[in-house]
Amino acid sequence: MRIEVSFPVRRPMNQPMNRLFACSCIAGLLLFLTVVPSWGQKGGGSQGTSRPSAPTGGSAPNVPGQPSPMGQSGPQIQTPLYVNGRVLLMDNNQPSPEPISVQLNCGPNLLQVIHTDLKGYFQFVLGAGPQSNANLSAADATPIGMVGMSGAGFPNSNGRFGGGFGDLTGCELRVLVDGYQPATHILSGPPELSTMDVGTIRLTRIAGVPGSAISVTSLLVPSSARKEFEKGDKDARDNKLKSATEHLQKAVAEYDNYAAAWNELGGIYAASHDTEKARQAFTKAIEVDPKYIPPYVNLANLQLQNQEYEDSVGTAGKALALDPAIPLANYLQAVGSFKLKRLDDAEKSAQEVEKAPHQNLPQVYGLLADIYMIKEDYPKAAAQMRTYLKQWPKGPFAANMKKTLDQLEASGTAAESQPKSSSAQPQANP
């Protein structure tokens, strides 16, 4: 289905009125809401039981596109850069009982997202040639068990690490966990260092926020069930889905209230297109820990995929009742409201996304542009398109959005500010 919206065009008097049609971006938005488990991120943090460290010995990997030391065409030897650290919870000075995400940002670019191991350690590896994450698309920091927006087309590190890694001074590590205050660490140190140890990043609970992305049930897990969860989580990240499913099923068989394991299982079932099992697993995770945020977001995502828009909006709302500052939950609610033709509600939810860190959700600008185009508020629509194109110039909607923006600017409507009533609704082509 394609949504078309017409807008007026300033034209010479001897030319007929032309109708310019804005191609909606919303048709492609759901491509980035595909249910993909968190382990789908390649090159994630170590899942072992000891602190990661830079490898020693052997040859440094080559970086394509650089001249060789001998002046011949060929790859140049480039030493990788390792950034190590640990994340602990402030209230008990212990690592999270579940893997959590750590982002690496340089300027406006979200370069990488990796996960801690179950001892809280993480390691970024930059400049290691094709096996490195340095130029891979950034994944998001959505709750464990599912990643909403990962894969081709996301902002990468072009210009910063294009053929090597360069100086990381001023880049930022960021840990965003629902229910906890955002934690950041600014990188500094001589650029010639091959290993940067950032020490410990501590997370503090947000007062008055009842929900959390870390389940209290994970603190009560028997050791045998925890071991099965660790094995399942590692296998899932290695894309060994059958083995991961078996280990996670053993984990919940030994400890039925293991919310994180149920949530992880839901992610695997969803990725395998087993919708009913995924729904049951997410629902079970919510049942055993009603204040555990990830399964609400994941279930809302699943419902949106299945065009259960009313249910998706409601489930996302339950997540936001536990923590109102969840960008993905607000985004899911915005898309669901848009699909239900509740433009004002969709606009409000999308604006909430903009208020929080949302580097992994640049398509929110496309959604807002759609909303304003339908409302015939072309200046606001143009502003959203410009922001999208600035932050995501090679994104999947960039070409169509650039074309529409050019049409708006050529017509002169981008400079006008006479929004019409929001009663205008999308018209679907057959």
Image (spheres, rainbow, N blue to C red):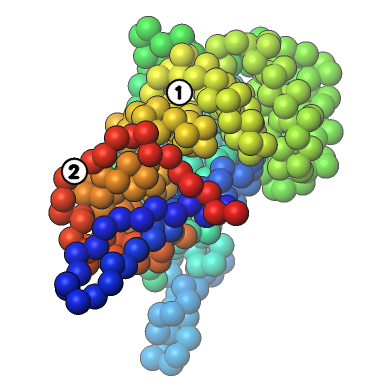
At horizontal 61% and vertical 44% (from top left) the residue drawn is: 34
| Residue marked by disc 1 | 178
412 on left or right of 3: left
Mark 2 or mark 1, earlier in chain:
1
Considering the image in quadrants, where does the C terminus appear? bottom right
Q: Is residue 339 above or below residue 414?
A: above
Q: Looking at numbered disc 1 in the image, what kind of residue is underneath it?
A: Asp
Front: mark 2 or 1: 2
At horizontal 19% and vertical 64% (from top left) the residue drawn is: 10
* Quarter assignment of residue 264: top right
Expressed as whole percent of the image width and height from the top left, the position of residue 347 reads 36, 33
* Quarter assignment of residue 144: top right
At horizontal 70% and vertical 19% (from top left) the residue drawn is: 283
* Quarter assignment of residue 331: top left
409 on left or right of 256: left
What label does residue 418 carry, if any? 2
The crowd level at tag 2 (other Cα within 10 Å; few <14, some 14-19, many 20+) is few
Q: Is residue 130 above or below residue 122?
A: below
Q: Looking at numbered disc 2 in the image, what kind of residue is underneath it?
A: Gln
